[in-house]
Each structure stands twice: as C-alpha cells, then as structure tokens.
Image (cartoon, rainbow, N blue to C red):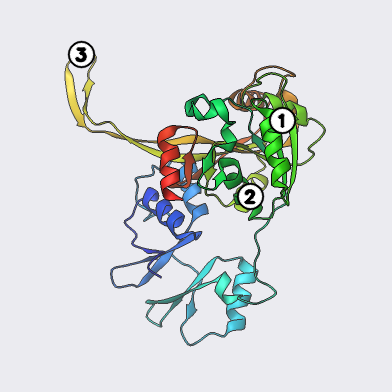
C-alpha cells in the first residue's frame, strides 16, 4: 500500500511522479494516522493542470474527499466486483469502521483468473517519423539511421514499437528518407509479427510533411511519434482522452522543471533594483513528440513541401480545429536523440 499512499500536502508534481513510479493510475490519500482522506487519479491531476494549477501547489483541494470504500470483513467478493465493473474503478480502499485504511483492492487482483479481467487494448495505426538524419547523434548516424541506434540488444525503434504492441497495436507506418534502404532491410530481416508499411519521402519534408502521403489511406484517428523518444504513457487512456474530448489533435506534453542557478534581478521602471529572486524555479509543459491526430487534419498539410508538426497545429487551430494537451511526468519521457539523454537510457535499461 505504501507505493500509492500519500499525504495531502504533497504537490501535483510529486503526485505525478508517485503515479509514474508505481505504474498505477490512482493514489490514496491518508493522514499521519493512516485515516483515509480520499483518492486522487491521474485524470484529476490533468484537470487541475488544465485549469491553471501550478505543478508545485498542494493536492489538498484536488483529491476526492468522499471516495467509494469497502468496510473490512463486511463485504463479499461479488460486491467488490460489482463496484469495479459498474464504476470502472482502478482501486477501492478498504477501511475499518473508524475510517482507517486497512487495505486497497485493485481491479487486477479482484478479477485475477476471472473472465471479466480488464484488458486495456486499442486498435489504432501508429506512424513513426523515421526519416531524419539524426545529426545530434553523429558520428553513429553517419553509419546507421537514427531509429536503428542500439539500446543494448535492440535498436531504439524496437523499444518504441514494443510499448505499442503491449496494448494490442499491430499496425505501423514508417516515414523514411535518410538511409531508407537500411531501414527497409532491417525490418525484412526482423520478420516482425506486426504489420509494417513505409511511406518514403523523395526529399526531407520536416516533421509532418510526409503525413500528406497518408491522405485517403487512414480513415480514423491515428498516433504519430518521433523515432527518438521513449515514453511511458497509458496509450489506451491517451486515445480515450483524445476521443472523449473531441480533439482534432492531441499532443503529449511533459512537465519540465528548470532552476536558474543564480539570483535574478527584478527592476522597476527607472532601473532600480526591486528584489533579487535567488535561484528561481520555473515549470513548463514541453512537447514530447507524441500525438494523436484525426485524419481530417491531413488536408492542411501542403503537398511535397517542408512542413513541421507545429505548423500543422497552428493551421488546424486557424481553421477552427480543437487541440488538446495530455500532460505526463518528466520521468516518463526521454529524448534519446541527444547524447546525454541517450546515455541515461542505456544506463537505465
């Protein structure tokens, strides 16, 4: 239980890190004597961020203070299963008659070896943008295309694909250009048990230009990912978030915390010092390079022109399309396209 039980004075950032580390989607809030105070889901955290809450504020006013609970020794298994299936809970706290936390029931344990066991899988095409030169990883990319740079016994692109196949996704489209023949040869030799197709740029088209080649090929929302990012994200939940909010484009954004290692000076209008802010801290949501797109937005992409995903987002918004942001913790995203981050991933795997 300690992996997901927290106090109410932790920050949004700390809560997101706790969820990311535990692999769960909900936290249980208790006081110093383990009395149950409430529950807090990853969705609650996202809603708070959307409403402008800073990631360093306390979760005290965010969590649900009246959660569904079961009383220890006073419930039957069938009752717990009914609550899970009707409400799609991830967990249910079990308390004593005084409200003290005694146990936590999880869907996976309640439905263990049961035909109603929840399986979160989705059927959605994934486009991997794999045509760049990878100049940040030279000299390796002078020999190999960036997606084939190894992380231990597998190339980056296999690690990326495995995270999708784990949730039932088996259709992949690779956009290729630089060292395209090597990319094709790799997958011919691999003989994967998933579907792999290629769209080939005759010239570099930026981070979104080649998506124009998907026009009339894809007829439902699809995911797009860069080939140099490894992300720990609940893909079914991301897809559901995109659909339920009626977004035309959803981008996954990582929380990033930056501390300036100096005292910064604030001046008034005549140039006099007002105060010195010692080592100020700033928080940003950073675009990770993972998206969900509706096929209709492809119409905004020009044919055979260099065009970036940021331009697509801007053009979609200009034409009245809705763009959403799905926040994740900064520990859940690594950009292996730069040497220092690549080395971190190699050390972690």
Q: Secondary structure at mark 2?
A: helix
Distance from label 1 to label 3 (Cα)? 48 Å
Residue 297 bears which disc, if any?
A: 1
Q: Quadrant of the N terminus?
A: bottom left
Q: Are marks 3 and 2 in contact (CB under 8 Å)?
A: no
Report x, y in % for residue 4.
42, 64
Q: Is residue 126 visible?
A: no
Report x, y in % for residue 194.
73, 49
Drawn side of residue 238 relative to residue 63, left or right: right
Drawn side of residue 96 relative to residue 312, left or right: left
First-in-chain label (1 vs 3): 3
Which of the pair 135/22 is nearer the observer?
Answer: 135
| Callout 1 crowding tier (Cα within 10 Å): few <14, some 14–19, many ≥20 | some
Residue 164 bears which disc, if any?
A: 2
Is the residue 90 above or below the residue 312 in the image?
below
- Image quadrant assignment for residue 101: bottom left
| Callout 3 crowding tier (Cα within 10 Å): few <14, some 14–19, many ≥20 | few
Single out the mark in the foreground, 2 or 1: 2
Q: Is residue 279 visible?
A: yes
Single out the mark in the foreground, 3 or 2: 2
Q: Secondary structure at mark 1?
A: helix
Is the residue 115 above or below the residue 39 in the image?
below
* Residue at figure coordinates x 71%, y 43% from the top left: 189
* Residue at figure coordinates x 62%, y 22% from the top left: 206
Single out the mark in the foreground, 1 or 3: 1
First-in-chain label (2 vs 1): 2
* Residue at figure coordinates x 22%, y 19% from the top left: 267
First-in-chain label (3 vs 2): 2
Which of the pair 217/13 is nearer the observer?
Answer: 217
Report x, y in % for residue 185.
70, 36
Q: Which residue is mark 3?
A: 271
Q: Secondary structure at mark 3?
A: loop
């Amino acid at each position: 239980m300690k992996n997901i039980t927290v106090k109410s004075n932790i920050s949004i950032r700390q809560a997101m890190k706790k969820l990311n580390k535990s692999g769960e989607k909900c936290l249980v809030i208790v006081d110093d004597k383990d009395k149950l105070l409430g529950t807090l889901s990853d969705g609650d955290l996202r809603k708070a961020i959307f409403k402008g809450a800073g990631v360093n504020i306390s979760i005290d006013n965010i969590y649900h203070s009246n959660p569904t609970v079961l009383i220890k020794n006073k419930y039957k298994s069938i009752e717990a299963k009914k609550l899970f299936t009707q409400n799609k809970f991830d967990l249910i706290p079990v308390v004593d008659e005084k409200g003290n936390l005694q146990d936590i029931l999880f869907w996976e344990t309640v439905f263990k070896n049961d035909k109603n066991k929840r399986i979160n899988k989705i059927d959605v095409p994934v486009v991997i943008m794999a045509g760049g030169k990878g100049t940040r990883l030279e000299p390796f990319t002078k020999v190999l295309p960036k997606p084939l740079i190894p992380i231990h016994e597998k190339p980056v692109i296999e690690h990326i694909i495995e995270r999708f196949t784990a949730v039932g996704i088996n259709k992949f489209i690779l956009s290729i250009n630089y060292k395209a023949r090597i990319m094709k040869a790799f997958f011919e030799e691999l003989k994967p048990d998933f579907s792999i197709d290629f769209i080939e740029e005759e010239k570099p088209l930026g981070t979104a230009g080649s998506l124009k080649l998907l026009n009339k090929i894809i007829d439902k929302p699809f995911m797009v990912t860069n080939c140099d990012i490894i992300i720990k994200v609940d893909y079914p939940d991301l897809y559901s978030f995109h659909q339920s909010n009626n977004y035309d484009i959803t981008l996954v954004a990582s929380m990033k915390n930056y501390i300036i290692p100096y005292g910064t000076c604030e001046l008034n209008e005549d140039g006099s010092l007002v105060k010195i802010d010692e080592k100020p801290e700033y928080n940003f949501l950073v675009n990770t390079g993972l998206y969900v797109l509706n096929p209709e937005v492809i119409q905004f992409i020009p044919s055979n022109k260099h065009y970036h995903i940021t331009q697509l987002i801007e053009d979609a918004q200009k034409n009245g399309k809705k763009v959403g942001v799905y926040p994740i913790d900064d520990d859940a995203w690594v950009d292996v396209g730069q040497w220092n981050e690549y080395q971190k991933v190699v050390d972690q795997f």
